[in-house]
Amino acid sequence: MYRRKRRGPRTLPCGTPTVIGCVEEFAPFVYTYWLLLLRRMTETQLEVCVDSLDSAIAAVDGGADRLELCSALSEGGLTPTPGLLAAVKKHISRPVDVFCIVRPRAGPMVYSEGEVEVILKDAEILKNTGADGFVFGALNADGLIDKKLCKQFREATCDLPCTFHRAFDFLPDPLSGLETVIELGYQRILTSGGKATALEGSDVLASLVTAARGRIVIMAGAGVKSNNVANIIALTGVTQCHASARVCREFKFEWTTGAKMGSGNDNVVWVACPEEVSALKKAVGEN
C-alpha cells in the first residue's frame, strides 16, 4: 500500500513555517490537551464540606477531590475564619482546591446593606489568605436571586471560580434560576433539586443537567452517602457530588458543672470519616 512520506512543517521559500505547517506540526499536542481537558471537565468528582482542621485532613486522606471549607456545619455552613483556611492549606497531605463558603449568619440568604459589607470584606480576606474558590448565594425578599449582590461578589473574588450554593433550592423556578446563575458567571451550582435530599430531588437534578448542556456544572448535594451516591449519579447524570461524610466523636469528661456553651451536646464533635470519604470516592469513580 502506498504511504505518503512524512514531512516536516510546510515552509515558505525563505524557510519560515506557514500557518498550515505549524498546525500540522502541533495538532497532535493540541488534540491531546483538549482530550485531557474534556476528561477533567466530565470526570465524576467528589467535594467534601468540612468545618474543622481534623475534618479537612480526614477528607483529603480519604480521597476528596475538593474541599468546601466552612464553619458551623450544624447551621448549614457559615464563613470560615482565615486562620482555619491557612491551617488547612498548610496541613493537608496533598494539594486540593479549597473553596470557602461566604455566609455571614444562619437563616434566610437575604442580606442587609451592612451584611453585604461583611460578605465582601470576608471574601477579600479569604482570597488574600489563599482560597482557591468560593461558595456563595443570595436571594431577594421575593425569593429570587439577588443579581446585584451575586454580581458584586463575583467581582470581589477577582474571577476565582465560584459555586452558587443551596440558596438555589429555595427558588420557585429552578430552570429559570439556572439561566440566571450562568449569566452571572458562576461555574457550578450545588443543589438537591429543591428537596431535602439529592435522591428525593433526582428528577429536578436530571432536568437541570439536561438544560445546562455543559455550560455549568450541576453538583448534587444533601444526603449524599457511599450507599446511595451511585444511584444518584445514575438517576441524574451529575458529574460532581458533595457530601460531609461525618461521624460523631464523643468526648468523655469526668466532671459535670452544668455549664453549657450552646444548645447541643458540648461533649460531641462531628468530623469527616476518611473511610466514608474513601467509600464515596470509590463509588463515584465507578460511574
Image (cartoon, rainbow, N blue to C red):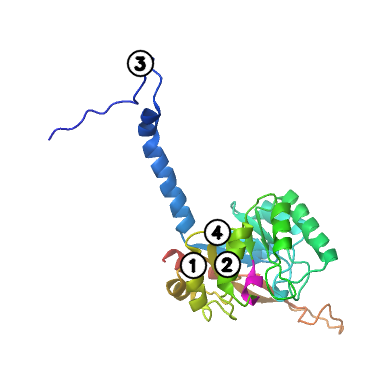
Q: Which residue is disc 4 drawn over?
A: 65
Q: CA distance from mark 1 to mark 4?
A: 25 Å
Q: CA distance from mark 3 to mark 1?
A: 52 Å
Give, as a three-letter code, the residue at label 3: Pro
**Residue at the far bottom in the pictured view:** 258
Residue 86 position, x and y percent, is 73, 53
Q: Residue at x 82, y 60 (%)?
A: 117
Residue bounds of the magenta highlight: 165-170
Give, as a three-letter code, the residue at label 1: Ala
Few, some or many residues within 10 Å of mark 3 (<14, 14–19, 20+): few
Question: Tag on residue 211?
Answer: 1
Near-viewer residue (222 or 60): 222
Give, as a three-letter code, the residue at label 4: Asp
- Which quadrant would the C terminus be assigned to in this image? bottom left
Q: Which residue is disc 2 drawn over?
A: 178
Quarter location, residue 19: top left
Residue 24 position, x and y percent, is 35, 33
Near-viewer residue (10 or 74): 10
Tell whether label 4 touches label 1 (CB within 8 Å).
no
Q: Which residue is disc 3 drawn over?
A: 13
Residue 168 drawn in magenta = yes
Residue 27 position, x and y percent, is 38, 37
